[in-house]
Image: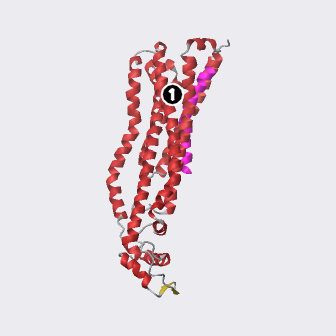
Amino acid sequence: MSNVNYSIQEMTHLALGIIFIISVVAANCLLIISLIRQHRAIFAVRTAVLLSLVVGDIMLALFSLVIDLLGENNIKCNSTFFSRVYRDYMLQFVYSLGLLMLALCLMVAYKRFEQQQQLHIQQQHVTALNGVDSSGHRAGLDNGESKTLTLGLALICSGVPWLVALIVILPLTAPRLTMCYAHSEVSREIIYIWACVVLPASLTLLVSAGVATVLKTRQEHFPKVATDYGPGVVDSVEAFPLQTSSAFGAGPENTTAVTAVDDVTDRSVDGQPHAAESTSASPLYPDPTFEQQQTLESATANDSVVRTPESHLGNPNSDRLMTSNFKRQKSALLVVAIVHFVCVIPNAVFALTFAYNPELHNDIDHVMFAVLSDLCKWLVVLRSVLAPLSWIGFLKS
């Protein structure tokens, strides 16, 4: 068996360490900037969770990688051990839980979006009947009351992965904080790998794929829900993205007033006479030409209407934008979950197969073992660069 050239290995570690420290910090700082620029209140929890994961990656660069550069001879054994535990186990466990939290938040946010859409369609239906629209006032109250709740929920969701990691990992590492790595127990290392890396990363990938599939199915069938209220209501949603009682002019104060439109025999549209429709027309489906004219006349006089944060609901362009946003989020979640799985699982498989298997460890060539060990180690660190760049790509799109 060939021997390892430790001087070359040390120089390689130094160069790669410097490169990855700069890369990890730069990529995560860019992600912070992107999150701040494109922050939306409806995605406050997502932003908080991502920022907590960003902090974890930056700590990897400024703590674990810096200690690796300084070398084991210049650092106490406990610090070296804890930096390795943080890099190989704790951060990967936290990132897996963070992705699971993001998947849960995405499902909840989309469910809320669907409920708001259906509620708005119902309100449009009532407005078409009675000419009364209280959706804006109600949305404003709901938004004001939910600010504190949203902030608290964001802080809780961002802190849960770290709290669970401390509860799970500290009991495993506590007995070894007073001893060096050379005296570690193989059985405990195997527990680390399964509990902190393999199972969470695998579960994250499965959940992310499941969420992407479920959201795709719900988005494909959601338009059918909107049409359950009748074609007239859907047309009114498209024609009136924001309705108030004055948006109908003096017309639909009640159903009688709407029906009275049909009794007019001579109405002018843009100065041209317009023949009246049959008086047997249903009040649920008033003359669309008359409604468009009334809307245009009242639009200028009502430019000062204050739109509430949820006044975009029912606006086809805004709805498509929100739907597209959810599509990008589920795609981003799935891509990052795949990147996370691909980067951390090889190191776990290598450790279980070779590092903690004395028979295979003694049979493999020393140079090959060193190359595979370093490759898997830096692949774990590479996740802290690829994942932020993936998030940035989907945020900018």
Does 376 appear in magenta? yes
Residue 250 colored in magenta in the image: no
Tell me, what colour scheme is on the image? secondary structure
Quarter containing the N terminus: top right
Residue 385 can be seen in this image: no
Toward the viewer: 186 or 68? 186
Q: Farthest residue to the right: give it.
A: 2
Task: Please tell me which residue is depicted at 39% across the width and 69% down the height of the picture.
Answer: 127
SS of the residue at dot 1?
helix
Viewer-side residue, 124 vs 376: 124
Mark 1: which amino acid? Val
Q: What is the quadrant of residue 252 in the picture?
A: bottom left
In the displayed structure image, the side of residue 121 where residue 331 appears, left or right: right
| 197 in relation to 293, above or below | above
- Taking depth in this image into account, of 222 and 176 the one nearest to the observer is 222
In the image as oriented, which residue stretches furthest toward the front? 280
Question: Which residue is rendered at x = 43% and y = 67% of the image?
Answer: 242
- Is residue 236 visible in the rendered structure shown here? yes
The x and y percentages for residue 342 are 57, 32
- Residue 320 position, x and y percent, is 52, 58
Q: At which x and y percent is residue 26?
A: 54, 40
Residue 223 vs 175, above or below: the answer is: below
Q: How many marks?
A: 1
Span of residues in magenta: 370-397
Q: Residues within 10 Å of mark 1 (few under 14, many from 20)?
A: many
Q: Is residue 287 left or right of residue 146?
A: right
Q: Main secondary structure of the magenta part?
A: helix
- Residue at 38% over, 36% down: 160
Residue corresponding to mark 1: 198
Q: Which residue is more in the foreground, 91 or 214? A: 214
User: Residue at the location (56% across, 12% down)?
Assistant: 358
Indicate the position of residue 267 as horizontal and vertical percent values. Answer: 47, 86
